[in-house]
Image (cartoon, rainbow, N blue to C red):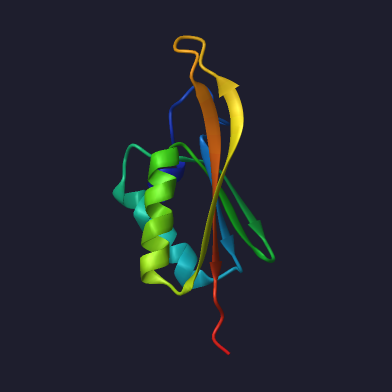
Amino acid sequence: MGFYMHNFAHSDYYEGKLQLRPYDEKLIEFVEKQFEKNDNIWISKKIVKKYGVDYFVSSNKFLRQLGKKLKNSFKGELIESKKLFSKSRLTSKEIYRVTVCFRLYKAL
């Protein structure tokens, strides 16, 4: 699982959060394979809860693309939200942290 390792000075750095609900092994396996495919993306933190998993990820763009892949590959609901985090000192642009939540529909 090499995608957890990174050599950055700020190991707590993340641009967005992926929330998977509820906890599902197939869903987690799919997501972790997507991280393994991309060497430029890393996970700052992974929190496993009884009701799901949260990944703190280094790229908003990757998160949004991953959300679309999840929606196309699994039956579920995709919710994206963003929160103002900071303002760039160089460009004065607003910097947002994105949260992508995917809720898997359980078969009845």
Q: Determine whether, in the image, residue 71 is placed left or right of residue 95.
A: left
Q: In this view, does 7 lie above or below 33?
A: above
Residue lying at the far right of the rendered structure: 50
**Residue at 54% of width from left, 86% of height from top?**
107
Q: Is residue 106 above or below residue 76?
A: below
**Residue at 48% of width from left, 19% of height from top?**
93
**Residue at 38% of width from left, 44% of height from top?**
62
Q: Is residue 67 above or below residue 82?
A: below
**Residue at 31% of width from left, 40% of height from top?**
39
Q: Is residue 69 above or below residue 3?
A: below
Q: Where is residue 24 in the image (x, y as percent from the top left)?
A: 54, 71
Residue lying at the far front of the rendered structure: 93
Q: Position of residue 84 (x, y in %)?
A: 60, 31
Residue lying at the far bottom of the rendered structure: 108
Asked whether residue 32 appears in the rendered view, the answer is no
Q: Where is residue 72 in the image (x, y as percent from the top left)?
A: 36, 67
Q: Determine whether, in the image, residue 19 is placed left or right of residue 29.
A: right
Residue lying at the far top of the rendered structure: 90
How many numbered dots are placed on residues in this image?
Answer: 0
Quarter of the view holding residue 108:
bottom right
Asked whether residue 25 appears in the rendered view, the answer is yes
Quarter of the view holding residue 49:
bottom right
Quarter of the view holding residue 13:
top right
Q: Where is residue 57 in the image (x, y as percent from the top left)?
A: 49, 41
Q: Determine whether, in the image, residue 54 is placed left or right of residue 76.
A: right
Residue 35 or residue 16, whichever sits in front: 16
